[in-house]
Amino acid sequence: MDEPYAQRIFQVLWQLKKDGYSENTIDPIRKRLQNLARYVNLDDPDKVKEFIAKATWSNGYKENIVNAYNHYAAFHQVDWRKPRYQRVFSIKKLPLETDIDLIIGHTKVRNRVAFSLVKECGLRPIEVANLTPKQIDSNKGLIYPETAKGGEARVLKLKLETLALFRGLVSKQNVRMSERIFPCSKTLQKSLRYVRI
């Protein structure tokens, strides 16, 4: 990627940061803009449209690329009309609960607790990654996660086994009340992909 594009992309990302976008939103936009800049002149919206139209990506990824480029075009005042790509939704085949438990059982304690929270409470990896001991009432077995993506606040009940694992983890790692317990969401997702292989 040319140096001028690196600078122009950085300007867009910095503006998003100043506008209050989270790192979890900004990072994918960065990757998509850098990917696009490898193949096409970002300041030529017709070439960008043509390249995206011919690409063999799914409509869902094309929609993501278009949304990322839309930030670039708005910031740099590039005149373009956003093309419309409609993602196709399908129902995914869910693994058996016994298979999920087998995967969870073959991981380190920290990941076992994190994956159990995803499975039992429906937490997103980013919500697990942001957890601190003060968000979990270890006496009542309740969890008060910070929501991601503007979701509503909620209180969730932990299973006794997960609660016991959590208590042991916090005690062993000597985690402070306001300190994060788990690694970042990317690391959690990578760990999950690794144990599924």
Image: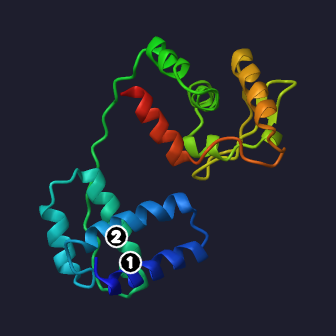
Residue 146 percent across, percent down from the top left: 70, 46
- The mark that comes first in sequence, 2 or 1, is 2
* Residue at image location 79% in from the left, 39% down from the top: 133
Q: In this view, does 164 lie to the left or right of 3?
A: right
Q: Which colour scheme is used?
A: rainbow
- Per the image, the residue denoted by label 1 is 72
Compared with 51, 124 (above or below) is above
Q: Name the residue under label 2.
A: 33
Asked where in the image residue 111 lies, by quadrant, the reply is top right
Residue type at mark 1 is Tyr
Label 2, label 1: how far apart the Cα atoms are = 8 Å
Q: Where is residue 4 in the image (x, y as percent from the top left)?
A: 34, 87
CB-based contact (under 8 Å), mark 2 and mark 1: yes
Q: Which residue lies furthest to the left in this view?
A: 54
Task: Check the image and name the residue furthest to the right.
Answer: 139
Give the quarter of the image for residue 37.
Answer: bottom left
Please, what is the three-letter code of the amino acid marked with disc 2? Answer: Leu
Q: Is residue 185 shown left or right of residue 157?
A: left
